[in-house]
Image: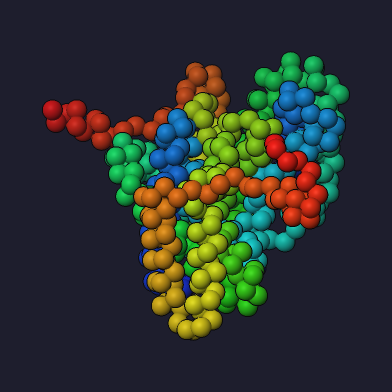
Amino acid sequence: MTEPIQVFSLPTSMEALAIMVGGISGALHARRRHMDVMGILVVAFCTALGGGVIRDILLVSGPPVFLTSPAFLVYALVGAGVGWVFARLTSRATMLLEVIDGLFIGAWVLVGATKALSNGLGFTAAVLVAVITATGGGVLRDLFCGEKVGLLLPGQWLAAAALAGALTFVSLFWTTGDLLRSQLACLVVASALRFISAAFDIRTPRPMDLGKVLSRTRT
Amino acid sequence: MPQAYTGVTALPEWTLYLAVIVGGVAGASYAARRGFDVIGVLTLSITAGLGGLLMRDILLGRGPIILRDSAYIWCGIAAAVIGFFFAGYIARFDRALLGLEALAMGLLATVGADSAIRASLPWLSTITVGTIVATAGPLFRDILGGDAPQILRPGVFLGVIAVGGSALFVVLDAITHKPLLSQVVVILTMFTTRMAAIWSGWETRPADDLSDRMWSFWGRRTRVDD
């Protein structure tokens, strides 16, 4: 086992922005489903903070981070408020929100992966925890809104980008042991995949039935 | 950092790995049927395969074994690969998968109940933990897939068998004190009841409302012909 590593953390302003964007997207979803104030707040909070909560439950690392550093709650609250009050403005700026979200996906992956590694987990488990940290909020949002879970459906590379970022970070860190460079590579790979798939409309692959392919070649 | 629970039971550990793969393949083929993508297949096979063991460790307040021992995650990934490439074969061997799932559910129920007994929980809690561990995987799968969970709907006995199996394990373990014997007996009993229920079409019914009958018992017929 490697020695405990420093848990990745964003500068405070970046962190606030990332959580606020999550809160806004949650609030917009809730509005679209005609929820009331409480619904908007709950969905926004889950979207912004849900991934971290699931991660902290999995890692058994005490109370979730948003309780120990309540500033997170304030950021999510501000995001929910913005999405609630300025709904028309923000829903016009979905493009901007998506871009910000895509920029931060690698960061969430890194937070999850480094926290898992510093808790003494192996590399496979770290990848799993990292992807859950980055995508858990969106899954909770879809479940609470009663929608199909977008993560599971064919579409743009979202969880797949997070997975690729996590794999990049873990494999680079495993082989070279250079924390800083592997973190940079993870950020670049995750965001690049996200934007490339959005720009060229590349879809995630569907299951293929190799059995059919094999029987066709035989006949 | 809380100590991770090794999760050993009387049966060797590879049986648990097999149970994870079986549950994972069932989750993956479900995802393939619903038209999900590669991430969907991976997510559902990992949640369906590992959900039960994860719930056990969360309930008992331990570091999840599935994160400590990476073999579990690899079993889930292997199941996803099988489901991603060979969904057609799996659909053809539907019946066999059903039987394997019944065996895996029995194993998970006994493992959950056994862990709860070792954590010196009272018997009612033990039955609850066994039931949750046995049914959590398919439950998570259905919730994520956007279905009403199969165990909650009227139909072929699933939850009832999980409860009964956990209860039987508690009784047998208290009487015999031989975990291996009671584990094997419980797994076989659960397997045969499940198969018998499927073949003969026994089904659970929607919940009855007894309030009218109770009133009529007390001589106050609220609604006579309804």
Find residue B53 and report its horizontal and vertical position in percent.
Answer: 53, 60
Judge whether residue A21 can be spotted in this image. Answer: no
Q: Is residue A10 left or right of residue A205?
A: right
Find residue B74 and report its horizontal and vertical position in percent.
Answer: 42, 54
Q: Residue at x 41, y 78 (%)?
A: B181
The one of A176 and B188 positioned closer to us in this rendering = B188
Q: Is residue A95 left or right of residue A131?
A: right
Judge whether residue A97 can be spotted in this image. Answer: yes
The one of B116 and B128 positioned closer to us in this rendering = B128
**Total count of labels:** 0
Instruction: From this view, report whether residue A78 is shown above or below residue B121.
Output: above
Q: Is residue B121 left or right of residue B136?
A: right
Instruction: From this view, report whether residue B115 is shown above or below residue A8.
Output: below
Find residue A16 and report its horizontal and vertical position in percent.
Answer: 78, 38
The one of A90 and B37 positioned closer to us in this rendering = B37
Q: Residue at x 63, y 30 (%)?
A: A147
Q: Based on the displayed image, in which of its 4 quarters is residue B144 positioned?
A: top right
Q: Residue at x 85, y 32 (%)?
A: A37
Q: Residue at x 59, y 67 (%)?
A: B127
Q: Based on the displayed image, in which of its 4 quarters is residue A78 positioned?
A: top right
